[in-house]
Amino acid sequence: MSTENFKIQIRKGLLEFCVLQIISKKEVYASEIIEELKNSKIIVVEGTVYPLLSRLKKSEYIKHEWKESLQGPPRKYYSITDSGLKYIEELIVSWNDINSSVKSLLKSKN
């Protein structure tokens, strides 16, 4: 496995967590989510984000609302639900556990 492939797999695994974190901050539409991911160096394409948003909505972690836009057609804005906030809390615990374990392994190597 190349290091690039390694990075891609890690990003894929963290994408749901990152998208939920973005949505939990404020109401956003898909293009804003994609832009924030790109700014964080988590490069994704629309074809990856839209199915993920659909799955998150189906799981009732997020909801959406159509709002008029000054720059064209109405936009679908996403926001977090109460169960989505609970899920994020669980993901944060999992992330902290994994991150701690990896850091421990890296320290033991030095």
Image (tube, rainbow, N blue to C red):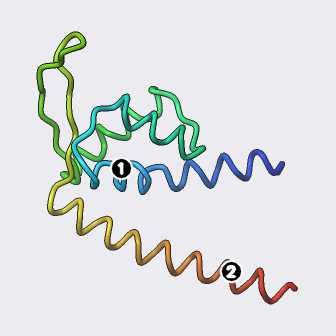
Which residue in the structure is indicated by mark 1?
22
Image coordinates for residue 18, horizontal then vertical, percent? 44, 53
Tell me the crowding category of disc 1: few under 14, some 14 to 19, or many 20 or more residues within 10 angstroms, Cα based.
many
Asked if residue 96 lies left or right of residue 32, the reply is right
Q: State the residue in front, 35 or 4.
A: 35
Most extreme residue toward the right is: 110
Q: Secondary structure at mark 1?
A: helix
Amino acid on which the number 2 mark rests in the picture: Lys
Identity of the residue drawn at 39% across and 69% down: 91
Image coordinates for residue 100, horizontal then vertical, percent? 59, 82
Identity of the residue drawn at 59% across and 75% down: 99
The image quadrant where one finds the C terminus is: bottom right
Identity of the residue drawn at 36% across and 56% down: 21
Q: Secondary structure at mark 2?
A: helix
Identity of the residue drawn at 74% across and 46% down: 5
Is residue 65 shown above or below 73?
below
Is residue 85 shown above or below 58?
below
Disc on the earlier residue, 1 or 2? 1
Residue 103, disc: 2
